[in-house]
Amino acid sequence: MTTAASITETGPGHEGDSPYALSHLDALESEAVHIFREVAGEFERPVILFSGGKDSIVMLHLALKAFAPAAVPFSLLHVDTGHNFPEVLDYRDRTVERHGLRLHVASVQDFIDRGELRERPDGTRNPLQTVPLLDAIEKNRFDAVFGGGRRDEEKARAKERVFSLRDEFGGWDPRRQRPELWQLYNGRHSPGEHVRVFPLSNWTELDVWQYIAREKIELPAIYYAHEREVFARSGMWLAPGEWGGPKDGETVETRLVRYRTVGDMSCTGAVDSDAATIEAVIAEIAASRLTERGATRADDKMSEAAMEDRKREGYF
Amino acid sequence: MSTTNATPGVVDAGATSLLRFATAGSVDDGKSTLVGRLLHDSKSVLADQLEAVERASLGRGQETPDLALLTDGLRAEREQGITIDVAYRYFATPRRRFILADTPGHVQYTRNMVTGASTAELAVVLVDARNGVVEQTRRHAAVAALLRVPHVVLAVNKMDLVGYEESVFAAIAEEFTTYAGSLGVPEITAIPISALAGDNVVTPSANMDWYGGPTVLEHLETVPVVADPSDDPARFPVQYVIRPQTAEHPDYRGYAGQIAAGVLRVGDAVTVLPSGRTSTIEGIDALGEAVDVAWAPQSVTVRLADDIDVSRGDLIAPSATAPAVTQDIEATVCHVADRPLTVGQRVLLKHTTRTVKAIVKDIPSRLTLDDLSQHPAPGELAANDIGRVVVRTAEALALDAYADSRRTGSFLLIDPADGTTLTAGMAGTAFAEAAAEAAPAEATDEDGWDF
């Protein structure tokens, strides 16, 4: 692996000459582990948002390393849109089982069934996740909520803190954010408020994939190229399903695709790809001319400030 | 060790290092253009981001894409055409991964500059070649010096507007180097550029044959980021105690933390502060792997040979070089909250992993960063003020001088009522000793700056 044992492994010509060099992945890993441990030390009821997507999988992997050989002192929370990829749900359940974790599920479907949320005309449930998420945080009295958001994803996220204070309505006020200096994270909050914590703030999509490769982390198979029935909508390949696609005039075809992000099926698009291995995926991302959200997320195309607005309301 | 390499064009995860740097300057200096060009020319701006900028620029009636929109993320910023907050940007070359803290330059945003500089190993200060070193430039240099940023780059921008004249550049570089050097900035590199035309940003300029140094990007790629930690006394603030209490690990007791400075070795005699108890390092677990040696900034778990009382907030340090503990702190601070800091105020002080009650005993002076003039006994510090404070803490802290250790010499003052971060503190003398010659007469006041 890495770290201290690699004193003699440091390759020539890169910082090379210091035996105390750390690779960028070592530095990012150390920073994220530090963040997890700060939260464990200062909060009562932390929870990790776990969707079964690659960023949440990397978060869990880092948390496991941060507290080994003890168990992770946090539970998991999945906000379930009801439009899940079966491979991802299966991965989620196996992961919870293997590590003996406790999983909370906040179900969008339950809120719709109770009449507390209404289905949108376009069928997407991504924006509907905010209410069940905030409800679960309140009911379980979670005071720190780990999210896999990265600052490189989106420009409103670029100004997000590592420790991001949310008011009693779960809202994010960019002007109320605390200056974050050195590695001194201020997690103080009043009863009813909570703090969103982003351990992967400084990671890029490529870092995440390189780390997955280095640590040999298993991912749901849909991240790698596979044949799938898809249809085109808003310039992306969506997978048919009970969520309501395809509509009239949309034709289904079988293509070789993979997913760059994993979210609600109704607004997460697949990309044409023959990258069937981690090495091929990394090469593909390094050469890509589109960001992962630009390539795969319909919900971010709504307006210039779509993410900023959702964040203000309490979204991830 | 890794399975990710050998693909051409792919950053080799095992071999690249990470550089955190900050830029300070205003739109007028061309900062957004410089940042936009670094991102754009290193191919870090992707097609959909550029399209979004083009769409937004057209929507505002601008014909060419405004690269500043890449960095102005919040609606209020776009509406007002200004940058309010620190924006973090990410890009990579085959040699290095970069984290850029992009900070606005005006005086009311000093706290953002201080925030960006606090984690930076390098700061880029921009000047307009037509104006040379101005008040704002001196303020940026002072922030870099105050925060002890190890490397400073002076980017003399808009060289195209002064005919690419070597003498213009040389005069500005000379004036800045003298000033920043007097503040104790250890390494200064001056580079003549035109961010708009692209001269010496990513590619060498064809218009300035007289300049033989690196481009901005070349310098960022090659500046050494690893200071040798073996010269620094080791500092290990304990974050969390790991006790599995399982059948497999019935007696495991490990102290989890990130090494803040120096090198830890198995067998080191150590002292736990503030209690003063001593022991020996029995083992170091580096995230799943037992190692004999570990160094800053690695996150590790340390096991001690003796079963002594150690908890979050304690500092483990080699017995030979352990810091003194104190309840009386003198520090230079930057006030970051909108409400003022006053003498007599009761606050919380967060230092490494320890948070204690404290009282602001005195605010001996406020400093104007533009000219380093002092204002004795200001009574309070307002947002963006830099000043000296004297603080008394309820419990002893193992505090280093900030000059010796950025990580264990820094602290926050927090409002106990609502948790607001009030003030960022740096223990000890403000600027390096070299400043003594630069600012003579003013320092005669007993309560003044310790130049």
Image (cartoon, rainbow, N blue to C red):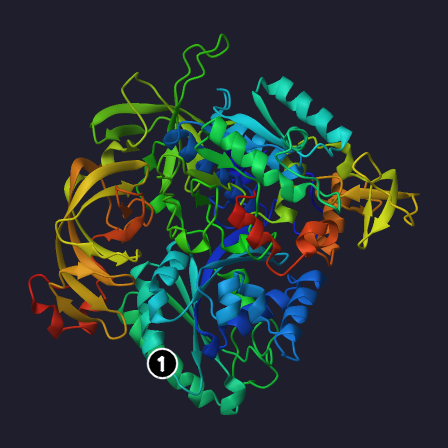
Counting from the top left corner in percent of width and height, residue B273 is at: 23, 31
Q: Chain of mark 1?
A: B
Mark 1: amino acid = Val
Picture quarter with the N terminus of chain A: top right
Helix, strand or loop under label 1 = loop
Q: How many marks?
A: 1
For the point 23% across and 60% down, the residue is: B430
Please rate how many residues cluster around mark 1, counting C-alpha atoms within 10 Å: few if below 14, some from 14 to 19, many from 20: some
Kindly give the residue lying farthest to the bottom in the view shown.
Answer: B163
Q: Is residue B323 visible?
A: no
Which residue sits at x=73%, y=49%? A296
Residue drawn at 72 percent across, 43 percent down: A124
Estimate the x, y position of residue B109 in percent, counting from the top left. Answer: 37, 65
**Front residue (pair B436, A72):** A72
- Please tell me which residue lies in front, A168 or B232: A168
| Quarter of the image with the C terminus of chain A in it | top right
